[in-house]
Image (tube, rainbow, N blue to C red):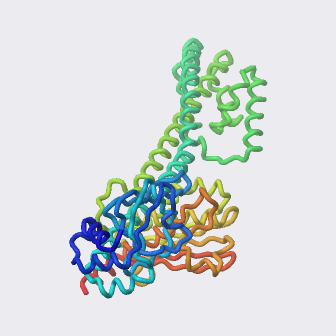
Amino acid sequence: MNSNDLSERLAQHRVLSALPQREIAWVAEHGALRHLEPGEVLTSKDGPVEGLHVVLDGHPSIHVDRGAGPRKIMEWRGGDVTGLLPYSRLVAPPADVIAEEPTNLVTVYRNDLPQMTHECAELTGVLVHVMVDRARHFTSSYLHDEKLVSLGKLSAGLAHELNNPVSAIVRSASALAATLADADAASRAIGSGALSKQQFVQLEKLRDQCLATAGQTVLSPLEREDLENKIADWLDDHRVDASYSEALADADFTTGVLDALTAAVPQQALEASVRWLATQVSTQRLSAEIQEASARIHHLVDAVKGFTQMDRAAVPEPVDIGQGLANTLVVLRAKARDKSVSLSTNIADGLPHVNGFAGELNQVWANLLDNALDAAAGGRVELTASQERENVVVRVIDDGPGISADIRDRIFDPFFTTKPVGQGTGLGLDIVRRLIHRNNGLIELDSVPGRTEFRVVLPSVAASSVESAR
């Protein structure tokens, strides 16, 4: 195909068709017509990008594997333009650009691009718009993927956190059903024991006295076992079933209370009275456990809702940084335990609000803390938040091995990660940087072996208002 035929072909191209014929002819003269078979690589992820590619027909695409299998993040068809665009700093794509079907394209090589921007002003303007659209698409794709990764971590952490209270509810509810049946039988036994009204009032007073003080005394496991053994011995001595000793010990019964019981009821009603007391305190204890576990679940759901900010509009608004950090800690404490990391916090009271997007800032805290927990496995992570002048400053500090000087300048680059394949997407810190800039803040890093500090500085609402007024 000669340059005239190629010019006619380019004149029908969707992006180039509105350009002056002189500029289309320039592309035809300086461009190289290329053909790719399915599976052939246009640009390797190792780079460099050869130049500007004008796709005439076919289907090049990029598939990136971020730990969950390859996923298409970008594709082009006839009428599209890709590759190195004017003023772009692109060196290499995030993965190989591969032809999915027979593809024909025109490549203007890198060395000719300065001349193109000089001689083809309208083409350069069009391609700059293409570059902006591409950058917007990639940013949206990165953020979407990172949100999915965070959602997976959030789900795993939430499942871990919910497991304990849910298990407690199931266990206590099952025991409560049996205890209620036993309580019913104990009540009938009390009724048949012919207790006088005064005796039953004394029995109720003993029950209320023990319920009022239950759980106020904290016993060590050895002290708890010693108390249970003493109660069991007392029950044996008074010919009462010793199996009630565990329930009575849980309610902080003492042999002194049981001695008072023998003075309040006749011997023939003693076992029924002990049984009734044991079932009463067990019912109360199991109900309290179910209530406490349910409250824990409610707290977790509130924290997750606050973390995701799923009911907020996508507009800047005053954000409570302290509350956001607290919600983030709730969903990451399970990972801290799994990593055997000591997680300490020092969040100042009365922090001023910042103007921004609460959900995005929570994403920042989650990413920074998650990275710190990975770096400090078996060590310590410290989270602080304070007001410094007109700013709110959040610090995430770990005692891990630190970030070496040779990679420190690259850690905010897209797709750069030091984690093994499948464990890191290389998107976290790039997304963190983008989100902080979107919220009018900045992020700084200091790192030496044994101490790495990420520092996020956000202007308070008052400072933002002053800046806007200017």
Name the spot of residue 414 as percent of width and height, x first. 50, 69
Foreground residue, 452 or 146?
Answer: 146
Residue 254: quarter of image: top right
Q: Work out whether residue 52 or residue 138 is closer to the camera in this orientation and state it.
A: 52
Q: Is residue 236 left or right of residue 34?
A: right
Compare residues 125 and 395 and report the one nearer the observer. Answer: 125
Badge count: 0
Q: Compared to 233, does 213 lie above or below?
A: below
Q: Residue furthest top?
A: 192
Q: Residue at x 68, y 31 (%)?
A: 258
Tell me the quarter of the image containing the C terminus: bottom left
Q: Where residue 93 sits: x, y (%)? A: 49, 68
Q: Is residue 314 left or right of residue 60?
A: left
Residue 459, given in percent of the width and then of the height, sits at 38, 78
Q: Look at the image and tell me in which quarter the N terminus lies.
A: bottom left
Quarter of image, res 222: top right
Q: Is residue 202 visible?
A: no
